[in-house]
Amino acid sequence: MGLDALLEAFLAVLNGGSFLYLMTGVLLGLTFGVIPGLGGTTALALLIPVTYTLNPLNAMYLAGGVMGATSFGGSISAILLNTPGTAPNAATTFDGYPLARQGKAGLAIGAAATASALGGLIGLFTLLLFIPVAREVVLSFGSSEFFLLTVLGLAAIAVSVKGKLLRGLIAACIGLLIAFTGANQFTGDTRFTGGIDYLWDGIPLVPALTGLFAISQMIELALKGGSVAEEGGTGEALKMKITGVGAGILSVFRHWTVLLRGSIIGTVIGAVPGLGGTVAAFLSYSSTAQTAKDRDTFGTGNIKGVIAPESANNAKDGGSLIPTVAFGIPGSAETAIFLAILVLHGMEPGPTILLQHEKEVYGLIVALTVSAVAASVIGLLLSRVLVLITRIDVNIVVPVVVLLSLTGVYVLEGRMADVLLAVAMGIFGYLMIRFDYPRLTLVIAFVLGETAERSFHQVRLISDGEVFGYMVGRPISIILMVAIVITFLLPTMRSVLGRRERMRG
């Protein structure tokens, strides 16, 4: 029955009108993804009144086109300008931008496009297999598992900072302080607000990350001057960048284990409500960097540092649809907006949605699949033009990116305070760059902090204070605790193995 609906949805895409809606969504997703500070959440929010006039299936194609294309769109600006178009693309900047600085932007774009497309396909294929058992799996994750999953993410970054452990811990503590700003969800007490009403609801993610990455990078570029790419001959060097696209595509197949691991992480993290693409991308990057033999080259232009987060970022779309469609629990900010589109068209999320709206659900799956591939193909076709961005004078780039970033931040909620927050975080981010403090640890602690605190309080209430005893009584919690211990032991295990290899040598 499911295969028939899937085939019918694919055939419907060939219809001129449906294909037009899908490609419109792809182009919108790419555009909103490339522009820092906007992203798929803003695009979908702006499309809600538009979809009201469409039939449900075409609304799915339009929304799916946006969701499937935004991730790769954000990677373009992340690679070329070190300015992530969307929050999850921040992980791509760590190796994508150094590659662009080395004149290998085409290599990075080719790898990002291919990893995004294949990651999306793997994530959606997993979703198709997962739909029959979605209810059991989603219900098996309780507060205990959410808490341990966030601890696992924090553990991964705690051991990933090479040579800057103390600075990394300081940055992580600052990230947690930022995450804990505002009213305590359980006691109602306000923390770190300084009497400012705006901070009562906490520090919003999009303005903070836009400032931390987009604005801070523009400050650095403005003070340095010149062009985005390092100086060099524009003739032969530019030709190398363009021809490097093919090498970037091949690199994904050469590092297929990185692609597969990133896709699995993205799908699993996407299926956990509240975590989303940012956690998936950073966790995929951290796990790849920790297990790679050439881990010391990460952050300096390792192509695996592009493949890992991009595959996870697109794969999370398939995973995030599991709790969204099955229970009405959004797995990410984008799916939260998408949930409103479902309800607007009379599709009440829940276990019966596949029975009552099977055509629309499979139509969405097809839209996400086609859009992930189409966005990558369009991006590759335009790579010759996109690479030229690295040669633009910073006096042109800086004001344009800052204007678009701050406009995107303001459009999201219509609050001037968000713009001021983005500027403040931009100055703080530049100081972190200037004094060599890792922004990665701060970002992950910020993203995971709220989930960790909420889940811990819930476990404490459920268990009457016997937190550990409650956790060891749940099989998935035990698996996660073992994974946390292994993560902390990895550096010691590597150093022991390294000494043995040197002794043998």
Image (cartoon, rainbow, N blue to C red):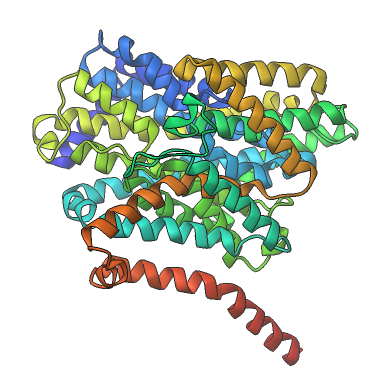
Q: Quadrant of the N terminus?
A: top left
x and y percent of residue 447 in the render?
48, 44
The image shows a total of numbered marks equal to 0
Up-down relation of residue 297 to residue 69 (above or below): below
Q: Residue at x 23, y 51 (%)?
A: 138
Along the line of sight, which residue is nearer the eye, 313 or 246?
313
* 484 left or right of 222 in image: left
Along the line of sight, which residue is nearer the eye, 495 or 174?
174
Q: Residue at x 27, y 21 (%)?
A: 341
Q: Residue at x 38, y 30 (%)?
A: 334
Up-down relation of residue 276 to residue 293 (above or below): above
Residue at far top of view: 53
Q: Quadrant of the C terminus?
A: bottom right
- Residue 251 visible (yes or no): no
* 93 left or right of 115 in image: right
x and y percent of residue 68 in the render?
42, 32
Q: Residue at x 58, y 20 (%)?
A: 419
x and y percent of residue 281 in the render?
50, 47
